[in-house]
Amino acid sequence: MRASAEYRKTLKRMFSYIRNCRLQLSLSVLAALFSVLAMLVFPLLTGRAVDAISQGEWGPFIRYVSLMALSAAATALFQFMQGLFNNKMTFSISRDIRRDIFAKMRRLPLSYIDSHPHGDVISRMVNDVDQVADGLLMGFTQLFTGVITILGTLICMLSVSWIVTLIVVLVTPLSLFTASFIAKRTFNLFYRQSEVKGEQTSFIDEMVSGASVVSAYSMEEENQKRFDSINHRFAEVSLSAVFYSSLTNPVTRFVNSLVYMGVALSGGISAIYGLMSIGGLSSILTYASQYTKPFNEISGVVTELQNAIASAARIFSLLDEAEERDEPGLPSLSSADGNVSFHNVSFSYTKDRPLIRGLSFNAARGMRIAIVGPTGCGKTTLINLLMRFYEPDDGYISIDGDDISGFRRTSVRRRYGMVLQDTWIKRGTVRENIALARPDATLDEVRRAAALCHIDNFIASLPSGYDEIISDESDGISEGQRQLISIARVMISDPDMLILDEATSSIDTRTELLIQDAFATLMEGRTSFIVAHRLSTIKNADMILVMKDGDVIESGSHDELIAQGGFYYELYNSQFA
């Protein structure tokens, strides 16, 4: 019952997208109607032509043959028009779904992105949407025409012989019941198939992006085994889904053969006893063939539609995820002096594993706050809380005395300039990447920021200079150069406060010394939060927060902490022992 309810719910939501293409849908239905009408006229004209031959009337025979040719041409024309309207409709629906998914991705909280494989999300946006488009295209093309053909042939057969039509109507429900019975039971199999396909895409994405790491650790055979396992599960569930859905076609063909046999026998007997002419028998046999053909086509459509509905269910489950609300009714934080405070803040990613407990500290305007500690102590989590990527479970964070939860998230984030250890370069020119936060920045401003980061010489060496197209996959740019571009991006944005999360981790020591001068200029008068593993880079910080297991266990300047001889003293000396 649960699967059936989900099936109906998914269908209902799919129709909400179809309603946006009402014009194309109406034109497609009209084209299908005229196509079927032209096709239904053909058997009638064939019967008349046969009767004309049997009676030796060659004039009417030539006229009927000419009309048959015209009917065939009209059928082909309207089928072509229906195909055009269906293609436009289905790909418009695909466009709308992808647009909604992409818009949804911008509203999802970072917690969703962190907890779901990126390959699975990509699979929903690409593979599942394509599957929905293919299913809808086949459905609209064959389902509409099939239903109209069935109804039209029944009416035409009724006009020739009500006895033969009655036999057809009595046998038909068996075919419909069989197709419906199998279709309902294949939905879960196709849903599972889409899930495993997403898992497969995610694994392939990981292996391609981490190919060098896989080779370095000789993990090719291990990953091959993992892929074979996923691939085997995908093959099993796909074969099960296709096997059960494929039962529809042979069963439907068997029932349709019974229909044709009944029509042939009853029609032949009627012709023998003079209840219909030879031409009428020819017409009704052709109608019987036209009547059974849509059932065979629709049974083939069922598999594609089941797959499409299962893919649509996965798409809608993504669209139904809880969003990160930007509280449009709240005011925006238009500026900040930089007085940041944590007030008894507690946070954990999962309730059973506490991370930060009762954290409190004050950062006055213009201070340089360094955050150090072993891996997993909560340094990056603290940054995520500052940026409101995550919300505290208890306590609050304030800027200039105001709780940041009272302002819109986007406005809080705009107050910070952020450089991460993991660089991100969008596909575009060097200039566009540096001016990401300020698209209206002039070329001189972009060059000034690049010069401060000592990357202007490298950019000048590129074939197109600042107009060179780069991306995360560009081979001619090192990781250190990517990080320098990210730093220049922050410099040109002129933020109120700074967050530097291992901002110089991929830069050589000589360049780092030059960058420190640029950072010194950038941080002047700005509250700055600096996360660093290399403790030599934060010796000049105004305050160092030493974190361990989510708690700040020590705080003070470098000299003060060294004098204490505590945990920071041990960390610092461990790097220079």
Image (spheres, rainbow, N blue to C red):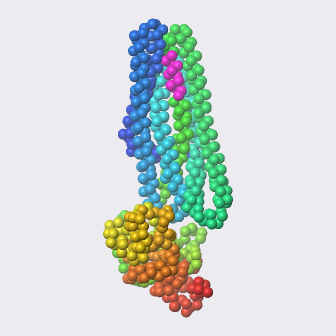
Q: Residue at x 36, y 71 (%)?
A: 446
| Residue closer to the observer: 138 or 389 | 138
**Any magenta on residue 17?**
no
Whether residue 359 is situated above or below residue 86 in the rendered picture: below
Q: Where is residue 361 shown, x and y percent of the image?
A: 47, 82
| Residue closer to the observer: 141 or 516 | 516
Q: Residue at x 39, y 79 (%)?
A: 522
Q: Quadrant of the N terminus?
A: top right
Query: In the current view of this chain or complex, which residue is farthest to the bottom?
Result: 563
Q: Main secondary structure of the magenta part?
A: helix
Q: Where is residue 279 shown, x and y percent of the image?
A: 48, 13
Residue 445 at least partly seen: yes
Q: Quadrant of the C terminus?
A: bottom right
Tell me which corner region of the image, top left, top right, bottom left or bottom right, holds residue 266.
top right
Q: Residue at x 58, y 56 (%)?
A: 204
Q: Residue at x 57, y 68 (%)?
A: 351
- Magenta residues (range): 282-293
- Give left or right: position of 214 versus 520: right
Q: Where is residue 309 shown, x and y percent of the image?
A: 52, 45
- Give left or right: position of 333 versus 550: left
